[in-house]
Each structure stands twice: as C-alpha cells, then as structure tokens.
Amino acid sequence: MRQKIKQWGCYAVIIILLPYIVTVFLNGPSIETSANVDHIYIKVKSGDQEIELPMEEYCIGRLAKEIPASYETEALKAQAILVRTAVLKKIKEAGSGAVLEDEFWSEEEMKKSFGTSKYKSSYEKLKKAWMDTEGKGLMYEDNLAHTPFCRLTNGSTRDGNEVLGSEEYPYLKIKECPLDIESKEQIQTVVLEDMDAEITGTDTAGYVTTVRVGQETINGEEFRNTYHLVSGCFTIQKYDGKLRVTTRGVGHGLGMSQYTANEMAKEGNKAEDILEYFFEGTQIKEVADIVLDTE
C-alpha cells in the first residue's frame, strides 16, 4: 500500500512539473524578468567617481532631480517610464561597461531639497511611481525609444527628425502644449554683457538653431548652455548698452513637456495616455520582452 502511495506521489510530481520541463526544454530558462532587471546594479558617475548602485536607487534619485515630486502620480509614472527606458537604452547600446552620467540626487540631496519634514512623503511618492511602473519601458517597433523631456515648452514640442537630423524619430512629432503658455515660468528675461550676436536660424517650433556671435556661427543649444539660458527658445535685443535675452519655456523643448503631462494627469489621463500623446506610435512593454545584451 505504501509503495503504491509513493508511486502515485511520483506520478503527481511529474504531472505538475511536466509543463515547466517542456517549456525550459523548448525555450530555455527565463533570462530576465521585469522585477530583477529593475534591481540590477549599474555603474554611475557620482562627482569624480564611478560607483555601483541598484538601478532602482539611481532612477529614483533621477526622478527626484528631474521632476517636481508635487506633480500628479500619473505624470510621475510617465516620467519613471522615460527614465527607465533611457537607462536601459544606454546599457543596451554601451554594454555592461556602460557608465550612466545623468545627474541624480542622493538621499542627502533629497532631504536638502524637499526639507526634512517633506522628505519621507516625497520620496515615497516617487518610489511608488517607480514601483507602479516596474519593468516597463517605451518601445518603438522593436527598439527602445529615445525619450527626451523638458520642464516646459514654448507652447509646442519640437520635431525630433528636424532637431536630431535623422529620420529615426518619427514618434517625436510637434505636439501642441497650450497650457504651458499659462505657466508662471513661461517668459523669463536675463541681461548679458553687450556682444555682436544675432539669431540666424530657428526650427519649425520656434527654437533657435543657430546664432552668429561675431564672425562665428554656433549652435543654438551651445549658445543657451554657454550663457545659462533656461530655454532653447529665445530672442535677443540690444538694451541700454547690454544684451537682453528673453526666453520662452524651460528646457530644450523636445519630447514630453512635464508641465503639460501634469495638467493632463489632473484631467484624469493615465501615464499611458500621456506617453502616447508625446511619443506617438510607441508602446509600453514589459522589460521581460526586451532582449538586454549587456555582455
């Protein structure tokens, strides 16, 4: 009797495990899952050093630095997907030796920025946005998408193919962001020392592409970075022996406007709706569906 019970027990185990055995035999063991990809260790630049951090810690630190924690949850979730996609794209393209150089906030920097009283709630809100989108990346066809973003546009985003000089970004189209115009940060003015400067080129969305400075013509973003302008959309005017520069928006104007994303979230739109609007034709997929070759 005992012998028969043992035999039936063995048969039961075989029946239970058979589907798994067949799957492994045909497809091989699972290589990546959404969860363990989010918890891999990655190399990042911190000051003058290269350190290793859990991907989750680094990306939450980036969220803290790149988008206001006070924003709506769905806007934060959209940003989390953009950050994860950018990190995975970098690792996929550069391999396991990739060093992530985008700045992020440490715990100490978050406490300093949020304030001791608001640190815990702000951190938990960002972490929840990260966890709620665990393993999700933005794909265009079979590739990880390019996922730029800015704080605030001049009223519309820019055309990716026009800005990047390539036909590889059909999903980065000009998108109207009329609510951005209502932001208190929309128009800002700075006064520079007088110089012989003239805007010589703008793109379809009105962002500066070239500036003549003396006898030299430089890229609009180079001029913006050199003189610490908040936006790539600006005008130049001689004023009282100085050079007055008026900017519209905050950032380069390409990809997702965080301000409009937040307003869309207030209206009930989900992260998926926000990303579909700004990255037309892309799809949100699980990381498990993405082949990460980091060898």
Image (cartoon, rainbow, N blue to C red):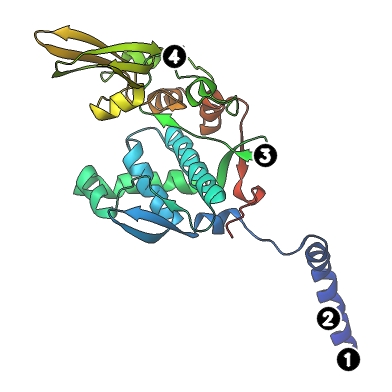
Give SS at disc 3: loop
Distance between the alpha carbons at the discs numbered 2 and 4 = 72 Å
Eye-nearest disc, 3 or 2: 3
Distance between the alpha carbons at the discs numbered 1 and 2 = 10 Å
Distance between the alpha carbons at the discs numbered 3 and 1 = 54 Å
What residue is drawn where x is 61% and y is 53%?
A: 292
Eye-nearest disc, 2 or 4: 4
Whether 244 is drawn above or below 287: the answer is: above
Q: Earlier in the sequence, mark 4 or mark 3?
A: 3
Q: Tell me the residue that label 3 is attached to.
A: 142
Q: Earlier in the sequence, mark 1 or mark 4?
A: 1
Q: Amino acid at mark 4?
A: Asp
Seen as rendered, the residue at the extreme front is 215
Give SS at disc 1: helix
Q: Earlier in the sequence, mark 3 or mark 2?
A: 2
Distance between the alpha carbons at the discs numbered 1 and 4 = 82 Å
In the picture, measured across the screen, residue 293 lies left or right of residue 193, that is right
Badge 1: residue crowd in 10 Å (few <14, some 14–19, many ≥20): few
Q: Amino acid at mark 1?
A: Gln
